[in-house]
Image: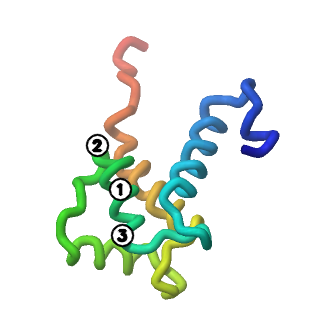
Amino acid sequence: MSEIASKKNMSDLENGMVTIINIFHKYSSHKCNLKKVELKDLINNEMSNFIMKIHDNETLDELFADLDQNGDLEIDFKEFINLIAMVTSACHELFIPNNSNN
């Protein structure tokens, strides 16, 4: 872990960013890219409350093709962040604080 990632005074957002980075590397291969099976494992193990678990190859193939912008048959970190951004944006309304007390 880098010096910046080990600081205890990081904000919640910074801690969340470090978590995203660490989860990506937990599942990625030695080249720091996700292959299809690694992406499937990451989604099924780490995002199952926000995304339905992937059971069939057709769903996995479609998602993988959408994410693999450079066509190298692997998902790099920037392509993975697109998935995180899409899911976070889609789930945003579930976490809007109730402002009726204002």
Amino acid, disc 2: Asn
Q: Is residue 89 above or below residue 98?
A: below
Give residue 77's quadrant in the image.
bottom right
Mark number, residue 98 = none
Question: Do labels 1 and 3 touch, CB within 8 Å?
Answer: no
Mark number, residue 37 = 3
Q: Locate residue 35 relative to residue 98 in the image: left or right.
A: right
Image coordinates for residue 6, horizontal then vertical, percent: 74, 35
Q: Locate residue 14 relative to residue 102 in the image: left or right.
A: right
Q: How many marks?
A: 3
- Mark-to-mark CA distance, 2 and 1: 10 Å
Residue drawn at the location 23% of the way across and 54% of the way down: 52
Of mark 2 and mark 1, the one earlier in the sequence is: 1
Farthest residue to the top: give it: 101
Query: Quadrant where the C terminus lies?
Result: top left
- Residue under label 1, please give it: 43
Mark number, residue 49 = 2
Q: Is residue 80 above or below residue 88?
A: below
Of mark 2 and mark 3, the one earlier in the sequence is: 3
Local crowd size for mark 3, using a 10 Å CA cut-off: few (<14), some (14–19), many (≥20): few
Farthest residue to the front: give it: 30
Of mark 1 and mark 3, the one earlier in the sequence is: 3
Q: Locate residue 32 relative to residue 102 in the image: left or right.
A: right
Amino acid, disc 3: Val
